[in-house]
Amino acid sequence: MRVFIVEDDINLARALQKILQDNGYEVDTVHSGTEGLSWAESGYYDVVVLDVMLPGMDGFEVSRQLRRAGVSTPILLLTARDAVPDKIAGLDSGADDYMIKPFSPAELMAHLRALTRRQGDVVFERLQLGDVALDLDSRELRCGAKVIMLSAKEFAIARILMENPCQVISKDQLMQRAWGMDSGVGENNVEAFISFLRKKLGHVGSKVKLENIHGASYRLVEAEGAKEAAHG
């Protein structure tokens, strides 16, 4: 489960991150509304934990813009304001739930469990693009009868690309999402694992293409031949 925290209080953000990581969640954190909107628009996360009072853009506006962009990721708003109009404004902005500060770790986890249960009908165990499928439990890449296991980083990159088919994903986005924002990895790491992933797509005989866009970004596309066979 991947949780995205948007919280400008550094100490609180760190505390939230530790609570979630201790419970087995993958967590990324940013500290401004504008940065939060940019990251959350990717649709990469399973839940967004969003503070209301943020620099750059408040949580209500972040929530509104995410919904206008068609992002359906569940949003849990955090705020110190418990007035009824504020709660109504938060829910009307597109948020799914609302929690008042201060709160206990147990309360936070209960809210997150409730949000992810509501999403149960749209959680898939497998991603499919053209003739290739990615099993989210086993990390296996499949094409017809051919199957190959992906390494953890190959899987992370493949999942990002398959969750955003035909969309251009930059090296920087892959580094931050697959390794984490503070990992310090370089572009050569991305290039190496892209090469490994291309070889594994070839090994299973997939016609899906992993394209290099202007040397700085990538895109996973269904080849015309594979598309016609799949739809024929």
Image: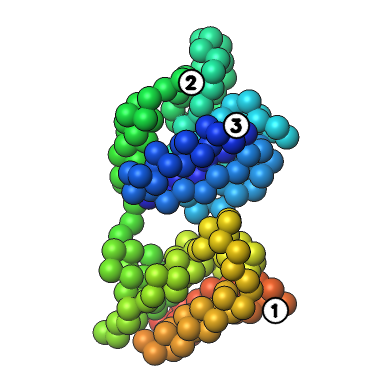
- Crowding at mark 3 (Cα within 10 Å: few <14, some 14-19, many 20+): some
User: Which residue is pictured at 34% across the width and 34% down the height?
Assistant: 109
Badge 1 amino acid: Gly
Residue, far front: 11
Foreground of the two, 67 or 140: 140
Q: Quadrant of residue 175?
A: bottom right
Q: Which residue is mark 3?
A: 9
- Residue 65 shows up from this direction: no
Q: Secondary structure at mark 2?
A: loop
**How far, Cα to Cα, is label 3 from label 1?**
37 Å
User: Earlier along the polypeptide chain: callout 3 or callout 1?
Assistant: 3
Measured from the top left, where is residue 15 in percent x and y? 47, 36
Q: Which residue is mark 1?
A: 215
Badge 2 amino acid: Lys
User: Which residue is pictured at 59% across the width and 36% down the height?
Assistant: 10
User: Which residue is pictured at 43% across the width and 42% down the height?
Assistant: 18
